[in-house]
Image (cartoon, rainbow, N blue to C red):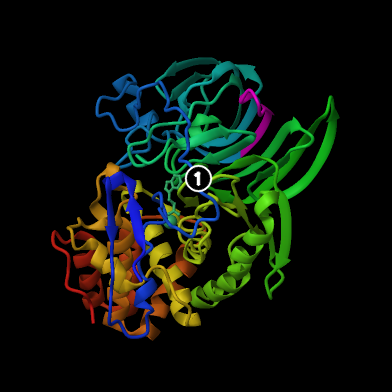
Amino acid sequence: MKRRIGWSFLALSVAVSCSGSPGVDVEESTRLNPAAPSTDVDAITPTATATVPPTSEPSDLVESSNPVDPASADLAGVGDSLYPTLGNGGYDVDHYSLAIDVDVDANVLDAAVTIEAVAVDELDVFHLDLQGLEVQEVTVDGVEASANRTGHELVVTPDRPIADAAPFTVVVHYRGMPEPIDDPAVPFDTIGWHQRETTVYVVSEPSGAMSWFPNNNHPADKATFDFEITTDSELTVVANGVLEGIKEVGGGQSTTTWRMDDPMTTYLAAVYIGDFELQESFTADGLRIRNYFPPAFADDLDDDFELTADVIDFFETLLGADYPFDEYGSIVLPFGIGFALENQTISVHGLDSTDPYTIAHEIMHQWAGNSITLGDWQDIWLNEGFATYLAYLYFEDRGLPSDIAPIGMYAALRGGSIGPAEVPVDELFSPSVYFRGGMALHALRVEVGDEIFRKILVAYYARFAGSAITTGEFLAVVDEVAGPDAVAVLDDWLYGPDLPAFPE
Ligand code: TRP
Ligand code: ZN
């Protein structure tokens, strides 16, 4: 059997057929990039691609000429290799409190966001990232501050300077209709806050968080969150973490509170508002799984997502570490969006992206990407290569057919690929990152054997859970556990100009 897969961002559609890999169901090994729109004929319902108009503002994400005064350029970015203007220097955020009134029909927000941060320098001025929307007032430690906008930089000048190492609290009041963002890494859609029909949904990786709240928009600055979302009482509101409560506030409106107690990066923060049915279950260890499905599809989806608990059990064993957060769940939108995204504790799936492989892939991201996060977007393969390959290991271990297998990944790379640890920004979610990144781990496993491979994974996770790292820190663990030959194999796969031979 051949299944067609589509990569809209490469403007091509490939069919891969494979044969002859022991222990792998090669016939099923061809559903490739979970990030890309799929032409999977098994989709529950035919869907159109998202029709959110692109942002009217020009993207200033990767421009070499910084829109900000060069004197303050180090405040307008954390020095990311691919996104020089994302995130901000001078402080670390500890906590975001998002209090947002949402008019779903009009798609208008009325918001007060409180940011608790600590200065890492003396600050006369500091930046937040916010694209679009209308800022009404900014206070710093209760005193009104002056605020200027330039591109996606919200430049705040507090009434008096903030001392080095001092904690401070910023409150930003703003309103308006969020404009989804055009990010060069995601040519297949806009990212950020979207409203479609009667549903609000957020998909933010990499830069979309700044379309709906002001923040320090880089994965290296993780913070805890709480969400107080006020909207029509008839609608269900879902966000990251644990549901704290739902309170009627009059006028047919309710405030739903969610709390994310473990540090989270801004691109994983998400809110969903619409008509969703809750389905709850537990893993063998008692971890709560709460899935939110569109009522019309809930029965089928309940079957699709039944493997969730078993996948979590498998990954806990593989990495020798508990699932990193308090709860897990998946939310499925009532329409197709061609992909899924691993929001912390609440992965979102388009109605067309609920195949078992994608479900396992998003679950793996809770460890690889969400608990261990990127110190730099250039290291994206640490997210996608791990999620791709370790999700495959679940199917291999359980003897189940998988949409992804090494031979299929390798075949998909034959057209040419650059090293996944060196991709340019417009290839952040390319086959090189997913499949050559995944193949790098497969080649490592073939080189060192299953036992040492597992030791590497366990040591890597134990050392870096909860922190932001770069590729060098992973390679150092490999060196410690398996020695320089193993590092050399990875070097070839991660940085080599040519595609290495298939490892056997
Ligand atoms: N991280 C997602 C995955 O592989 C892919 C992805 C990246 C994505 N950016 C996105 C999905 C934006 C939706 C929207 O699981
Ligand atoms: Zn992924």
Residue with the mark numbered 1: 47
Q: Is residue 147 magenta?
A: no
Of helix, strand and loop, which mostly describes the magenta segment? Answer: strand
Q: Nearer the viewer, residue 202 or 415?
A: 415
Q: Is residue 216 visible?
A: no
In the rendered image, the quadrant that contains the C terminus is bottom left
In this rendering, the answer to whether 296 lies above or below 118 is below
Which residue shows up at 55% across the image and 30% down it? 212
Count of number-bearing discs: 1
Q: Ligand 2, what quadrant?
A: bottom left
In this rendering, the answer to whether 43 lies above or below 144 is below
In the rendered image, the quadrant that contains the N terminus is bottom left
Task: Residue 166 in the image: state x and y as whole percent.
Answer: 56, 34
Disc 1 crowd, CA 10 A, few/some/many (<14, 14-19, 20+): some
In the rendered structure, the answer to whether residue 473 lies left or right of residue 307 reads left
Q: Is residue 108 magenta?
A: yes
Q: Is residue 387 visible?
A: yes
Q: Amino acid at mark 1?
A: Thr
Q: Which residues are magenta?
A: 96-109
